[in-house]
Image: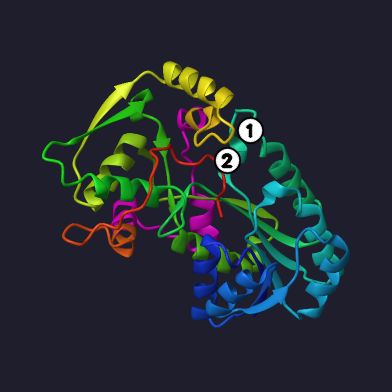
C-alpha cells in the first residue's frame, strides 16, 4: 500500500513511518519546510512539499502523490480538518485514518476541544472510508513532551542520599493510561490496512489504568531514583498557578494542566483489541525502554538539560 502521511516529521511520525516500512508500505510525507522534508526522508518516506493550511493547493498535491490511503497524524486542533478532508475526497483517497485524542472527552472548557470535535464531525460526515483513533498521553522516547522530561528530572536527582520529596497535587489518585508510541503506530497501520475498521472511532491507551502516583513511581524505578510522594491539596496549587498566569507573559504551566491532572483518564480498549489486534505493552516495560533510549538507566551517565517540573500536557497527542 502507498500511504500519504501528514505529520510524519513529528514524534509519532517517527514510529509510524518505521512501522510502515517494516510492513512493506511506501510512504509519501507532506512537509512544509526543508527541515521537515529532510526529517521524513531520513525516516524512509518520500517528501512532498506542501502546507495543510493551503486549501487551494492541497487537493492537487494529494492527487498527484498517487497514494492509496491518507494517514493524518497532524493535529486536528489547528482547524485544518475541513481542508484536509475535502482535498482527500477530491484526490480520490477513499481510505483515511485520522489521529484525534481522548482529551476531547474532558469536561473542562479546553480551548481546542471544540475545534477537535468539529474536526471529527467533518471527518465522520464525509464520503471518506474513515477511521479515527483517539490516543491517551503518548510516551516512548525523546520528544514525547511528557514523560521524557519527568525521567530526566528524576535521573538528575537520583544521586541524592535521601528520597526525593515530590509534592503531588490531589494525592496522585487520579487514573492515567499512557500509550507507547510504537503500540499506537501499530494500531494506525492496522487501521489503514483493514476495511472493517472504517467508520469507527477507537480509544487507544495502555493495557490498564494506573494512578498518577503509580506512574511517578514506575518512572522513578526506571532511572533508579527514589521518590517519597507528598500529597498536597489541589485548590491552592490552582490558585497559585492562576496568579502566576496573570503576571507571566509566557507561563510555563497553566491552570488547565492541573485541572486535567485531576480528571481520571481511563479508557476501555476492547474495540481496538478486537478489530486492530491491539496488544499494548505494560507501562513499566515501556517506561524502562524509554529510560534506556534516553540513556537514563541506572549505571549510565545522566544527560543534563534545563528542566521544569510540570504535570503532563493535557493535549498535543502527536
Tell me which residue sits at (33%, 25%) in the image. 171
Dot 2 falls on a residue whose secondary structure is helix
Relative vertical location of residue 243 with respect to residue 271 in this rendering, above or below: above
**Picture coordinates of residue 309, whole percent (x, y):** 38, 38
> On the image, which quarter does residue 87 sit in?
bottom right
- In the rendered image, residue 272 lying in the magenta stretch gets the answer yes
Q: Quadrant of the N terminus?
A: bottom right
Label 2 with label 1: CB-CB less than 8 Å: yes
Q: Earlier in the sequence, mark 2 or mark 1?
A: 2
Q: Is residue 63 left or right of residue 173?
A: right
Which of the labelled discs sits on residue 65, or is there none? Answer: none
Q: Give residue 79's position: percent from left, percent from top.
A: 75, 48
Element type at mark 1:
loop
Q: Residue at x 68, y 47 (%)?
A: 77
Q: Identify the residue under disc 1.
A: 110
- State the extent of the magenta-drawn residues as a range: 259-288
Amino acid at each position: 500500500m502507498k500511504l500519504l502521511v501528514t505529520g510524519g516529521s513529528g514524534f509519532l511520525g517517527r514510529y509510524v513511518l518505521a512501522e510502515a516500512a517494516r510492513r512493506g508500505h511506501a510512504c509519501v510525507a507532506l512537509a512544509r519546510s526543508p527541515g521537515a522534508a529532510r526529517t521524513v526522508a531520513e525516516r524512509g518516506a518520500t517528501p512532498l512539499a506542501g502546507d495543510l493550511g493551503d486549501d487551494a493547493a492541497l487537493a492537487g498535491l494529494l492527487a498527484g502523490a498517487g497514494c492509496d490511503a491518507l494517514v493524518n497524524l497532524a493535529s486536528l486542533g489547528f482547524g485544518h480538518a475541513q481542508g484536509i478532508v475535502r482535498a482527500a475526497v477530491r484526490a480520490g483517497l477513499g481510505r483515511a485514518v485520522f489521529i484525534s485524542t481522548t482529551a476531547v472527552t474532558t469536561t473542562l472548557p479546553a480551548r481546542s476541544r471544540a475545534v477537535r470535535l468539529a474536526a471529527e464531525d467533518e471527518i465522520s460526515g464525509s464520503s471518506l472510508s474513515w477511521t479515527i483513533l483517539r490516543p491517551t498521553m503518548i510516551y516512548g522516547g525523546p520528544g514525547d513532551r511528557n514523560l521524557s522530561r519527568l525521567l530526566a528530572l528524576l535521573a538528575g536527582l537520583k544521586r541524592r542520599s535521601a528520597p526525593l520529596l515530590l509534592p503531588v497535587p490531589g494525592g496522585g489518585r487520579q487514573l492515567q493510561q499512557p500509550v507507547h508510541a510504537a503500540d499506537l503506530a501499530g494500531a494506525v497501520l492496522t487501521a489503514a490496512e483493514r476495511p472493517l475498521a472504517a467508520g469507527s472511532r477507537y480509544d487507544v491507551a495502555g493495557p490498564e489504568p494506573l494512578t498518577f502516583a503509580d506512574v511517578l513511581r514506575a518512572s522513578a524505578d526506571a532511572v533508579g531514583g527514589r521518590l517519597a510522594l507528598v500529597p498536597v491539596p489541589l485548590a491552592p496549587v490552582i490558585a497559585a498557578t492562576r496568579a502566576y498566569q496573570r503576571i507571566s507573559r509566557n507561563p510555563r504551566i497553566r491552570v488547565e494542566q492541573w485541572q486535567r491532572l485531576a480528571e481520571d483518564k481511563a479508557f476501555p480498549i476492547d474495540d481496538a483489541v478486537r478489530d486492530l489486534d491491539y496488544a499494548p505493552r505494560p507501562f513499566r516495560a515501556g517506561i524502562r525502554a524509554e529510560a534506556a533510549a534516553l540513556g537514563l538507566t541506572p549505571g549510565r551517565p545522566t544527560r543534563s538539560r534545563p528542566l521544569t517540573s510540570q504535570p503532563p500536557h493535557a493535549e498535543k497527542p502527536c
